[in-house]
């Protein structure tokens, strides 16, 4: 049974893995300042969105995404933007985490 087309013989055609790696972007490690003065460091790809970063932080904190907001340089980071869309955000940047309500 065939598993699909063999793209290896076609010139200029990217595999899914190559295309995914291109759009994922470079590695970016973010340092999160938590409200209790603790720190959290998580590695991402620049093409991942802020919503995914919030999800990862929430997993560590045991809360929901609506419970926190992320701020960089005093500005809230919109969930729909990719990390590479946030002006000035780079590897080892510090992102402030605030709780929207007491949990």
Image: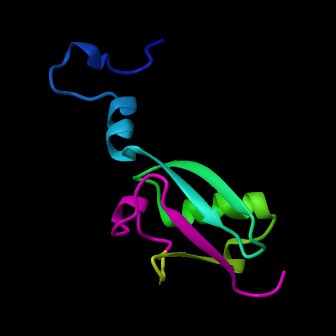
User: Which residue is at the front of the view, 71 or 56?
Assistant: 71
Q: How far from the left and from the top, in percent, is residue 61?
A: 78, 64
Identify the residue at horizontal 76%, vertical 58% (top origin).
60
Q: Residue furthest left?
A: 11
Q: Is residue 69 above or below residue 9?
A: below
Residue 26 in which image quadrant: top left
Q: How far from the left and from the top, in percent, is residue 14?
A: 27, 29
Q: How far from the left and from the top, in percent, is residue 46?
A: 41, 52
Q: How far from the left and from the top, in percent, is residue 35?
A: 73, 76
Q: Is residue 26 above or below residue 4?
A: below
Q: Residue furthest front?
A: 37
Q: Is residue 97 above or below residue 102?
A: above
- Considering the image in quadrants, where does the C terminus appear? bottom right
Q: Which residues are magenta?
A: 79-103
> What kind of colouring is applied to the model shown?
rainbow
Left or right placement of residue 2 versus residue 37 in this view: left
User: Which residue is at the front of the view, 10 or 103?
Assistant: 103
Left or right placement of residue 56 versus residue 101 in this view: left
């Amino acid at each position: 049974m065939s598993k699909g087309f063999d793209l290896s013989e076609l010139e200029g055609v990217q595999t899914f893995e190559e295309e995914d790696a291109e759009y994922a972007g470079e590695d970016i490690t973010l340092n999160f300042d938590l409200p209790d003065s603790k720190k959290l460091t998580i590695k991402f790809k620049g093409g991942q969105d802020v919503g995914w970063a919030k999800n990862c932080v929430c997993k560590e904190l045991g809360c929901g995404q609506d419970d926190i907001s992320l701020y960089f340089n005093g500005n809230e980071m919109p969930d729909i933007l990719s990390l590479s869309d946030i002006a000035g955000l780079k590897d080892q940047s510090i992102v402030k985490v605030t709780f929207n309500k007491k949990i």
